[in-house]
């Protein structure tokens, strides 16, 4: 089982394009229905409109798909985007997908079946660390090499080597470096780029011949591997000399088969990744959903990868973090997304060189800040989870730190729940002060009113006095006033509120309320709206009361 959007993303725009979103999203089976097929009953099916070539037949097929509780119908372009077809599909609530004109129904069936079978296997067994099996690509490389009696490599669209032939007798140093390094060396890339090879690969379906280059680089024959307009990779052969047309044609046919295989591998890999994301999300949200998780030895921390750019699409942020972590050495990062925020599960032990550990993620965050890649990101970790049942608790703690980070109350670029415990306590207390029934004005409101009416600074004075209780000189220094001025203000304050500040519990209650007020004022000043238990503070000005002392 796989959802419709995941299938479309996996196969890419070279094959499928969504036209109408349906009410059902889960694909359980694939049904090939032609225009004369009047009876099928496959709930949750993806219905392929093979042979449907007019709007009337398409609408009839859509109507039958709705009665059969199918999730979506696939039609060839341009029929799928015909308003007379898309309109009824939208009204009836069934998904409508367009198959590109150059695509084959047979290929679509094969690829979709492969994805569904792979997803079913994943659902019933352990999530594989590398679900893609590239073994067949080596067989394709060997077959191509045998056809032309020359070494062959198969590369992806980024010049990474996916497979190579056993035959390498006439390989040049560039070919050997490519195979050993699993990607084309940069000097060789520059040589081929200067010959316009990569530009032609992007735009042409035709074989490309490349002359010999410096440092013993032999001539090459390059065959693009495409799926429609999308470049998936290329077949590179050391050119042994002029090749007969039938051998070049055979290489081109091999490229078509390899294209299907690469699409299937990409789709299976995408299905496996989505299965990992979904399982991990379920495990983080509930301790009852942790039985299918496959994690490295614990303990673990759940980490929120928060940033200030809340308008960015969650799926984009998740893909971005996956790319960053992969680049920094974690080939299969444990990532998911909860309420739009990417969440990672890392091990609590391990050094900064241990990919996938908390120390490693902290080092990554430090690098990001040091080189100014992005200073809006906060790496926020919950407490260690010693069992999988503790993951949901660690996740909740990491999530709680997000709002603190966005208000500037959490250390950057990374922090833990333990390090931010005091800020959590204050934030929870502030939230409690806003609940019903209200606390009433309390002793602080008269100070707020006095500051507003007479331009005094009693609220911040009392806050500094409580922070440095018993140390009047330090309290005065923090306010940049003379200790005698501080003493005078405190006398005025106690007279105004009529309370004895010698009472420790009273001081604690006032300190909590004051912190809430001052935090709200800071948030308002920085443009971050936040509810407050009392009115915001007036702007600080020189006070007439201070001039009296």
Image (cartoon, rainbow, N blue to C red):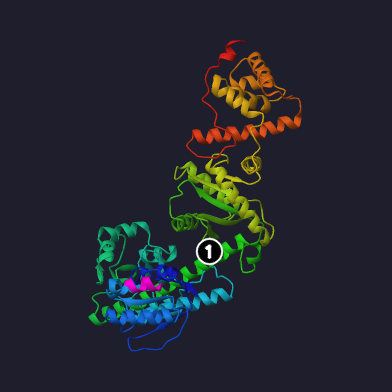
Q: Is residue 168 visible?
A: no
The secondary element bearing badge 1 is classed as helix
Of 483 and 200, nearer the camera is 483
From the viewer's perspective, tell me whether residue 508 is left or right of residue 532.
right
Task: Give the magenta range.
Answer: 86-96
Q: Quadrant of the C terminus?
A: top right
* Looking at the image, residue 105 lies above or below residue 536: below
Find residue 182 and report its image quarter: bottom left
* Residue 540 image position (x, y, % from top left): 53, 23
Find residue 76 and report its image quarter: bottom left
From the viewer's perspective, tell me whether residue 187 is left or right of residue 267.
left
Dominant SS in magenta: helix
* Looking at the image, residue 446 lies above or below residue 402: above
Of 296 and 11, nearer the camera is 11
* Residue 496 image position (x, y, % from top left): 66, 21
Q: Tell me what residue is drawn at x 48 percent, y 44 percent.
A: 376
* Residue 498 image position (x, y, % from top left): 71, 23
Of 44 and 68, nearer the camera is 68
Identify the residue at the far top of this view: 548
From the viewer's perspective, tell me whether residue 255 is left or right of residue 388.
left
- Asked if residue 91 lies in the magenta stretch, the reply is yes
Find residue 184 and report its image quarter: bottom left
* Residue, disc 1: 277
Q: Tell me what residue is drawn at x 55 percent, y 55 percent.
A: 343
Crowding near pointer 1: few (<14 within 10 Å), some, many (20+)? some
* Residue 331 image position (x, y, % from top left): 51, 61
């Amino acid at each position: 089982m796989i959802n419709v959007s995941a299938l479309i993303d996996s196969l890419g725009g070279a094959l499928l394009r969504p036209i109408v979103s349906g009410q059902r999203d889960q694909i359980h089976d694939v049904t090939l229905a032609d225009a004369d097929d009047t009876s099928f009953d496959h709930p949750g099916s993806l219905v392929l409109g093979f042979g449907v070539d007019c709007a009337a037949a398409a609408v009839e097929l859509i109507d039958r798909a709705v009665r059969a509780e199918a999730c979506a119908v696939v039609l060839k372009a341009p029929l799928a985007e015909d308003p007379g077809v898309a309109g009824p599909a939208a009204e009836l609530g069934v998904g409508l997908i367009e198959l590109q004109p150059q695509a084959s129904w047979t290929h679509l069936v094969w690829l979709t079946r492969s994805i569904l079978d792979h997803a079913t296997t994943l659902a019933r067994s352990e999530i594989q660390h590398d679900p893609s099996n590239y073994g067949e690509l080596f067989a394709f490389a060997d077959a191509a090499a045998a056809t032309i009696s020359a070494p062959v490599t198969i590369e992806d669209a980024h010049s990474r080597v996916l497979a190579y032939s056993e035959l390498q007798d006439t390989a040049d140093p560039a070919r050997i470096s490519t195979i050993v390094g699993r990607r084309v060396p940069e000097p060789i890339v520059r040589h081929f780029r200067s010959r316009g090879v990569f530009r032609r690969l992007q735009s042409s379906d035709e074989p490309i011949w490349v002359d010999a280059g410096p440092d013993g680089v032999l001539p090459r024959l390059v065959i693009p591997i495409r799926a429609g307009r999308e470049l998936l990779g290329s077949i590179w052969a050391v050119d042994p000399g002029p090749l007969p047309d039938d051998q070049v044609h055979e290489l081109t046919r091999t490229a078509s088969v390899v294209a299907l295989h690469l699409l299937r591998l990409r789709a299976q890999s995408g299905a496996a990744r989505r299965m990992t994301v979904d399982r991990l999300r379920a495990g983080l949200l509930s301790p009852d959903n942790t039985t299918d998780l496959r994690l490295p030895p614990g303990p673990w921390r759940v980490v929120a990868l928060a940033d200030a750019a809340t308008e960015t699409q969650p799926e984009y942020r998740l893909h971005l973090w996956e790319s960053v972590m992969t680049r920094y050495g974690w080939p299969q990062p444990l990532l998911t997304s909860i309420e739009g925020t990417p969440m990672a599960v890392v091990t609590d032990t391990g050094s900064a060189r241990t990919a996938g550990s908390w120390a490693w993620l902290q080092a990554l965050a430090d690098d990001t800040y040091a080189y100014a890649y992005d200073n809006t990101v906060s790496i926020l970790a919950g407490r260690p989870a010693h069992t999988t049942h503790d993951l949901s608790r660690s996740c909740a703690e990491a999530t709680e730190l997000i709002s603190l980070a966005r208000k500037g109350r959490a250390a950057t670029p990374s922090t833990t729940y333990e390090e931010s415990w005091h800020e959590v306590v204050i934030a929870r207390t502030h939230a409690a002060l806003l609940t019903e029934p209200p606390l009433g004005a309390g002793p602080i409101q008269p100070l707020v009113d006095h500051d507003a009416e007479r331009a005094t600074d009693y609220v911040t004075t009392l806050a500094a006095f409580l922070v440095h209780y018993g140390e009047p000189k330090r309290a005065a220094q923090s306010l940049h006033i003379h200790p005698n001025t501080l003493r005078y203000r405190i006398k005025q304050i106690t007279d105004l509120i009529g309370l004895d500040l010698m009472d420790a519990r009273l001081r604690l209650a006032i300190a909590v309320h004051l912190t809430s007020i001052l935090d709200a004022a800071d948030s308002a000043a920085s443009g971050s709206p936040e509810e407050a238990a009392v009115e915001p503070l007036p702007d600080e000005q020189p006070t007439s009361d201070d001039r009296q002392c």
